[in-house]
Amino acid sequence: MEKWFIAMKKADFNGIAEKYHISPITARLIRNRDIIGDEEIDFYLNGTIADLYDGMLMKDMDRAVDILAEKIREEKRIRIIGDYDIDGVNATYILQEGLSGLGADVDTDIPDRIRDGYGLNKMLIDRALDEGIDTIITCDNGIAAADEIAYGKEHGLTVIVTDHHEVPYIEIGEEKEYILPPADAVVDPHQPDCGYPFKGLCGAAVAYKLIEALYNVMQKDPEDVDYLMENVAIATVGDVMDLTGENRIFVKQGLEMLKCTRNPGLKALIECTGIHVERLNAYHIGFVIGPCINASGRLDTAKRALDLLNARTRRDAVMLAEDLKALNDSRKEMTEKGVEEAVRLIETTDLKDDKVLVVYLPDCHESIAGIIAGRLKEKYYRPVFILTKSEDGVKGSGRSIETYDMFAQMCRCRALFTKFGGHKLAAGLSLKEENVQRFRETINELADLSDEDLQMKVSIDMQLPFPYITEELIHELELLEPFGKGNPRPLFAEKNLRVIRPAVFGKNRNVLKCRLEDSAGNQMEAVYFGDVEACLAQMEKKPVMSFTYYPAVNEYMGRKTLQLTIVNYQ
């Protein structure tokens, strides 16, 4: 059962509305997102590239830049080692493009998800040594690779880490002892003594900051690499970072650049997935473009996604984009089967009584474990780990709920893992098969989750009567975009609405349409895209209900109508 509550945050909404030429409704929505004070409101509504922080504020940035400037001048061979997800691929591309633009002798390597696993490993270092590489730069990984980096250093490599993951630590009593890798420079805003003001950057954004700082130091115009902001935007949304602070500017600007991108690969991917380029928004990155880029690292090699970004001709770009789309289609199919199997296991065993779900699907492709975990988290609103059989034991991915710090809990049973990493809401791990049951028992014994913690909370911005919903208001709400994690789409509610003529449409019967009428007789068209059969049954049983929704303008055959998209119902 969901728990609905209305955000009751206080402010002078009329004063804010007058000052920023917006409606009091929009002023309230901004306050609900904890944007307080003139400076913050102005940054939120009007922030531009000029408001981004100086990358040199990051710890070790000066060292990283000095080392690279010298390596470029000495024509040393530099290798970028990225990661196989959307953030890692875009971070790799940003470093490669930026360094190439400065005349560096640079190439790339991305680990294979199945063969190499996550992040830096000895095999990748040996490969670099065999091929005469002088310097390794990691991106979107490296902060947890202390042993591997020590090995590289012993063999004479220069190593620069750029990452955005939490720094691993050991708890000694009340204190945390952080374990930093012995690299020549470590650039990661999560280092405890890093003074960078914004901690929420993705790996690609950290890479972008490095390139920008390097261009400044080498007296090249950093505006030459502005176009890479579209890659930062893709990575930020695709890696589900909070769309607050700097990330908001990166995504806002990056989306505008993406609409007229000069990158043949991205252009081809936008076309072949059928996105209307002028309507391109964060949703399309999260649910259309992003999954295609991620699919290559899941089912094939992420090098194909990097090839797409590097494609020089239209022909190559179209071919690679179609490949990635096909891979993503088969990934979707595999995901559906995996979710069905996991649900069957949970529903038919004592798993359903656990507060933390640990589901072992030995035959599932390890690359989709995280997606399945995310789907189950939505369904059961509990932290979920999906474990799969791999070449050397068991691998798994976890997805968490707001009230459960997954990484912190895993640190408490780290002895069970051969490898693990992550953050509050998502994690990855490897362990021996004989420890699967013990992991399930231990992580549940450690979980101090109350029933209330496991209740899905629906945060409603405000009650909004139908007469307030106008085309003008809907257009004004666009000022709050891009929407996503940390900056949710506004959610309104209204109670005691009568449902008129509900019916299910669509070739897959996946859309419910109806009209909703308030007590004063005002009517609105509405659509629902969730479990439509369950919703229909509820509407037919009890035609007066409460709804949460967001309004939109629906354009069909040149005719505009106002329409509500139903999100929750009671």
Image (cartoon, rainbow, N blue to C red):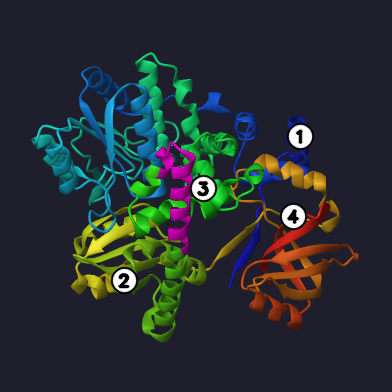
Q: Which residue is mark 2?
A: 445
Q: Residue at x 44, y 65 (%)?
A: 330
Mark earlier in primary sequence (2, 4): 2
320 magenta-colored: yes
Mark earlier in primary sequence (2, 3): 3
Q: CA distance from mark 1 to mark 2?
A: 51 Å
- Range shown magenta: 308-329
Q: CA distance from mark 2 to mark 4?
A: 44 Å
Helix, strand or loop at mark 4: strand
Q: CA distance from mark 3 to mark 1?
A: 45 Å
Q: Which residue is mark 4?
A: 551
In which quadrant of the rendered view does residue 203 lie? Answer: top left
- Locate residue 193, reporting x and y percent: 32, 33
Count residues near mark 3 (Cα–Cα under 10 Å), then give few for <14, some for 14-19, many for 20+. Answer: many
Q: Quadrant of the N terminus?
A: bottom right
Mark earlier in primary sequence (4, 1): 1
Q: Which residue is mark 1?
A: 15
8 and 551: which one is in front?
551
Mark earlier in primary sequence (1, 2): 1
